[in-house]
């Protein structure tokens, strides 16, 4: 008997047909009677729940959770909830806008080398995004109701016969792993990333925790792309409502990028250095707050000697930090206030400080006058984008790099402290209880 796997599938509004297609592919292309299926209905405007209850006749090992709060949890939280509820050690995360290829379960168990490996699957996608090395661009349909299952199955079978080797270092959805990695080593996604970038953060932490990341060409899935995040017709740019939704997604993604830079010092999947850096700005001129907003993410602390500017900057950054994500998720102010403790939060009161003190506790201190900063803005931002690499290649001491005076007092690389999440899993998973029926 094949080793049992729990397939974990989140679904939301407008995704019923895609979810039913995914289930049909699991029926066709796996020994699904030996496995478990968990479906997390985060939102539902198509009677998806009723359709899935009917499907339990075909899939008796399927369990369903229906979020009835009126507000989506989001995949950054519901993946952990599903993995926690899984009865089997091996868990597989599948997005609802995917179709699995031939013998997916067989190849998961064949290519998932050990309990320290996370195995990502090869995505086959229609030509709606540019090609990239880790995926295959091939059009089997851009709509669940028009999908060519037979042609897709034939293509996957030919791909598997090519016997391509595993690719080291790759990670993206969908993926499979032993769930103890998720909880004991990784503690899930970092929930400060509410709309995107959680996967990039996860890759860095996996590398820091010496977890083996691999991609298999034999565990192939078709991915309709962006259905979950942007909706069924996201690529129809002549549709005004689609344009608005895509613009909102873009603005939310930008805030995720800023979160990422605050945490890791830059954007990328390979981060080796992170230093405790304070930036002290003498506000010797009237201020364009946008200038300060552009440089804030690159340092651990921003010290300003004008209390009004400090307060306004803090409020402006906090507003953008939450507003676009909440709008995209349709969170009201009262709901966000009731659940925000379930998300990792940035402490802006600590990051942005009004002070006239001349002593600072950061390992590295940058000093500048605001007027000099504004007059050398492009050069300043370029330096700050690379400041951690610059510090790593520079000895302890005092240096001048216009417009900054740089004091390197200590060189404590804090990258190891970022490999683990400080997360209350009981609070995340059990409150409210998500019971799969």
Image (cartoon, rainbow, N blue to C red):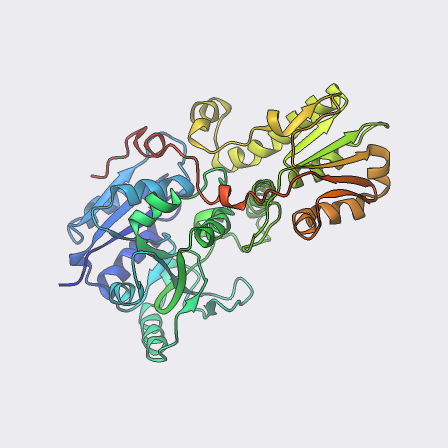
Residue 294, percent from left and from top? 71, 39
Is 206 situated left or right of 409 in this image?
Answer: left
Is residue 47 visible to us here? no
Q: Is residue 405 above or below residue 201?
A: above
Residue 330, percent from left and from top? 48, 33
- Quarter of the picture containing the C terminus is top left
Q: Quadrant of residue 281?
A: top right
Q: Nearer the viewer, residue 42 or 374?
A: 374
Q: Quadrant of residue 258?
A: top right
Residue 435, percent from left and from top? 24, 35
Residue 229, percent from left and from top? 47, 47
- Quarter of the picture containing the N terminus is bottom left
Q: Residue at x 33, y 79 (%)?
A: 161
Is residue 86 visible to us here? yes
Q: Residue at x 48, y 30 (%)?
A: 331
Q: Residue at x 37, y 80 (%)?
A: 162
Q: Is residue 335 above or below residue 166?
A: above
């Amino acid at each position: 008997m094949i080793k049992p796997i729990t397939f974990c599938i989140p679904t939301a509004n407008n995704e019923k047909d895609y979810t039913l297609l995914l289930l049909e592919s699991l029926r066709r292309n796996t020994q699904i009677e030996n496995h478990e299926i968990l479906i997390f209905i985060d939102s539902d405007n198509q009677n998806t729940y009723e359709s899935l209850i009917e499907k339990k006749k075909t899939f008796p090992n399927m369990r369903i959770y229906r979020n009835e709060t009126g507000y989506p949890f989001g995949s950054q939280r519901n993946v952990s909830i599903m993995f926690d509820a899984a009865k089997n050690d091996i868990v597989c995360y599948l997005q609802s806008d995917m179709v699995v290829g031939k013998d997916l379960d067989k190849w998961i168990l064949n290519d998932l080398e050990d309990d320290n490996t996370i195995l990502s699957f090869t995505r086959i996608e229609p030509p709606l995004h540019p090609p990239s090395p880790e995926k295959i661009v091939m059009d089997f349909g851009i709509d669940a109701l028009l999908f060519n299952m037979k042609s897709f199955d034939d293509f996957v079978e030919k791909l598997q016969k090519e016997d391509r080797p595993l690719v080291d270092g790759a990670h993206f959805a969908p993926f499979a792993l032993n769930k103890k990695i998720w909880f004991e080593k990784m503690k899930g996604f970092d929930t400060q990333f509410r709309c995107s970038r959680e996967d990039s953060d996860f890759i860095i932490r996996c590398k820091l925790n010496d977890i083996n990341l691999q991609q298999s060409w034999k565990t192939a899935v078709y991915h309709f792309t962006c259905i979950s995040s942007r909706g069924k017709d996201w690529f129809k740019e002549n549709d005004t409502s689609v344009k608005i939704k895509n613009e909102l997604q873009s603005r939310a993604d930008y805030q995720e990028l800023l979160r990422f830079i605050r945490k890791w010092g830059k954007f990328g999947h390979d981060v080796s250095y992170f230093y405790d850096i304070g930036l002290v700005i003498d506000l010797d001129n009237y201020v364009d707050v946008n200038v300060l907003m552009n440089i804030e993410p690159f340092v651990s602390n921003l010290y300003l000697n004008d209390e009004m500017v400090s307060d306004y900057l803090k409020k402006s950054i906090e507003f953008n930090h939450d507003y676009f994500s909440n709008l995209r998720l349709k969170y009201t102010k009262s709901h966000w206030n009731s659940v925000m403790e379930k998300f990792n939060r940035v402490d802006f009161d600590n990051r942005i400080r009004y002070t006239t003190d001349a002593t600072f506790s950061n390992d590295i201190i940058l000093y500048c006058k605001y007027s000099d900063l504004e007059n050398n803005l492009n050069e300043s931002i370029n330096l700050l984008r690379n400041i951690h690499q610059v510090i790593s290649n520079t000895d302890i001491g005092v240096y001048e790099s216009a417009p900054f005076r740089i004091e390197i007092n200590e060189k404590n690389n804090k990258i190891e402290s970022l490999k683990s999440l400080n997360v209350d899993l009981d609070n995340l998973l059990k409150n409210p209880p998500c019971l799969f029926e």
